[in-house]
Image (cartoon, rainbow, N blue to C red):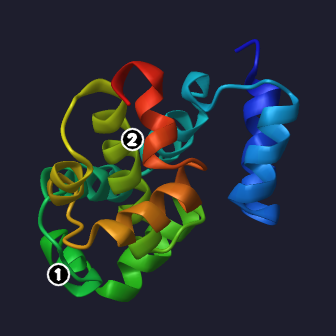
Amino acid sequence: AAFSQVDLMLSFLRAHAGPTLTQTCMRYLALNVQGAQSRHLMIDHLARSTPEVLAAEKWVQAHLSTPFTVATFARALSLSPRTLDRRIRQATGLSPLRFAQRLRAEAAAHLLETTHLSFGEVSDRVGYRDPSGLRRVLLREVGTSARGLRGPAQG
């Protein structure tokens, strides 16, 4: 809670100026991205605001390792793709695809921070067959690279 304003500022920078400027600001301010909890709190809090979005979050979590389309995602929740899009956007401000990418990025960040799995193994576990795709999503959604998430102890 003490650094929530810093997390908010970094989130704003990341969204409007990109990860490069965010990383530069973090270096100047001597901030460590691993301490930030905002990436977990926002989706977690907003997703629980409606039963449909909570169900969507649970479904994505259960299918992290399996690539899927928005149509498949909607069908699994007994919604049309348009209704799924509307509900997720109302609760989170994200499209269903971006919502799933954010959840996958959060899961990948957690695995990178807490395990010694290779980046390829982490990529497979969160549904990215091409590790370069996960690298881009991590930079956009988490604001750091896989190496930054590993920390000095894990290399």
x 72%, y 47%: residue:
11
2 or 1: mark nearer the eye? 2
x 76%, y 42%: residue:
10
Quarter of the rendering containing residue 42 = top right
Q: Mark 2 Cα within 10 Å, few/some/many (few <14, many 20+)?
A: many
Which residue corresponds to mark 2? 109
x 55%, y 57%: residue:
139
Q: How many labels does the image show?
A: 2
Label drawn at residue 31: none
- Horizontal side, residue 74 vs residue 110: left or right: left
Label drawn at residue 72: 1
Quarter of the rendering containing residue 70 = bottom left
x 23%, y 28%: residue:
115
Tell me the quarter of the image containing the C terminus.
Answer: top left
Q: Where does residue 150 sit, x and y in percent of width and height?
A: 41, 32
Q: Where does residue 101 sit, x and y in percent of width and height?
A: 39, 64
